[in-house]
Image (tube, rainbow, N blue to C red):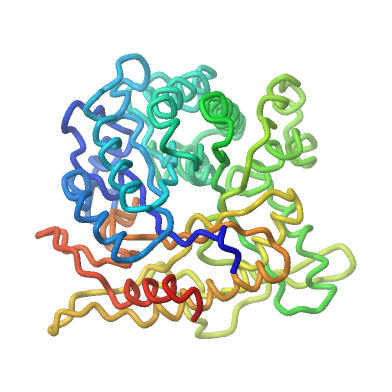
Amino acid sequence: MNRKFIWGVATSAYQIEGAYKEDGKGLSIWDVFTKEPGKIFQNHNGDAACDHYHKFESDIELLKELGVDSYRFSISWPRILPEGVGRINQKGLDFYKRLVNLLLEAGITPFVTLYHWDLPYELHLKGGFLNDDFSDWFGEYAEAVVKTFKDKISLFATFNEPQCVIGLGYGTGIFAPGYKLPKSEILRAVHNLLLAHAKAVNVIKSHNPSAQAGLVTCGAAFYPVDNKPENIKILPLAYQSQYDELSILLYTDPIFFGKYPEQCYKDYPQFYENIKPQDLKLISTPVDYLGINNYEGVPVEADGENSFKMPIRQYGYPQTSFEWAVEEDCIYWISRFLYERYRKPVYITENGMANNDWVQLDGRVSDPQRIDYLKRYIGKVLQAVKDGVDIRGYFVWSLLDNFEWASGYSKRFGLVHIDYKTQKRSPKESFFWYRDFIKNNKF
């Protein structure tokens, strides 16, 4: 394996930090959304989460024991700028300074995500992503973070999963802020997000030209039902068939090609024909990589010369606790497709499985399904690398069991079990498997 390959784990601020109104932090849309009855499983919230804000030192000890090269985490925008813009909360910055310094002392590379869904509530009240000033707000926030860490952080992601930010937050309404908006407003939100991404990339490069900056995507990971040439050939058509706010190409084509997918102009001319050329020029500001989050996929097969179908999976197919299919071919093909389409290095920024884990009577947390899942998916990542896909790193989601958005604490993704009553950390057997895998760099 190329020595540049990074093995890591990932988390996000709202899902693990807790301390939601401590040390001057402002409210986020999730702080407010989770207080609305019925929005979250059993009305759970992230007020305390994993209490990482107070336990980050012991969590870094876990990272050291795990032996990862890198730790991907997000910074809470309202912890840095309580009102979203203007006044900087020094105590918030100091928390992340301590975190980053300890990571560097441990020889662990920080991989920072600027936005993992926790929009400052004060900016939400001003329209959030629907306000055309959003990109300037985000640029100001990026400036506060990057200026502070320009000499210590060299890996940045601007946005995590814009498909969920906009598609689930402004489209279906199942994520904060819980909106179900008309298409014209959703498209505006997408466009403002992409402008914000580009402005943040420019901020990052202005302070550290050698830093790597990119965006983390997710979405339907189409893969062929088998390796017949006609089924492989149809894959681009499958990916191009989706171009709405939940798709991949709606967000990535403008970054890499400087234009939205062609079908957008055909179906929504009233919006796309009025986009300023300078906007697209800005959005296509060069990035260094594309992050891919992948958990499951969609099998496809050719149905004639220029058509495809999605066959029904076999009865009793393996599933995670989220009822997501275990189908490791998807991570190979989404990596290969996006690399061949854009010719930019790839990081697998999230991959993992929700499982029904608990601490057993003997104190162990046995999770053989997760170990098998990781073997399957990592094996396909390594196969993609062998086949010429420029993948630079792989990150397990997640280090810790955590608050899983609308599912609350009902789903456990962690390599480390969290007792949410006592906040006790118990490494699972998958933790030790991943530790040994990283150490040996082989199965």
Identity of the residue drawn at 31% across and 29% down: 78
Residue 336 screen position, x and y as percent? 70, 62
Vertical position of residue 288 compared to residue 380: above or below: above
Q: Going by the picture, which residue comes out furthest to the top?
A: 86
Q: Is residue 295 above or below residue 226?
A: above
Q: Nearer the viewer, residue 343 or 13?
A: 343
On the picture, is 433 further left or further right than 346? left
Percent position of residue 201, x then y: 57, 31
Q: How many marks?
A: 0
In depth, the one of 221 and 168 nearer the eye is 221
Please report the residue visible at 79 percent of the width from the left and 72 percent of the height from the top.
231
Residue 294 horizontal/vertical position (percent): 53, 61
293 left or right of 233?
left
Q: Is residue 13 visible?
A: yes
Q: Quadrant of the N terminus?
A: bottom right
Q: Quadrant of residue 91?
A: top left
Q: Is residue 396 left or right of residue 405?
A: right
Q: Nearer the viewer, residue 255 or 179?
A: 255
Q: Residue 149 location, x and y as percent? A: 40, 32
- Residue farthest to the left, as pictured: 422
User: Which residue is located at x 21 percent, y 37 percent?
Assistant: 20
Say if 346 sits above or below 136 in the image. below
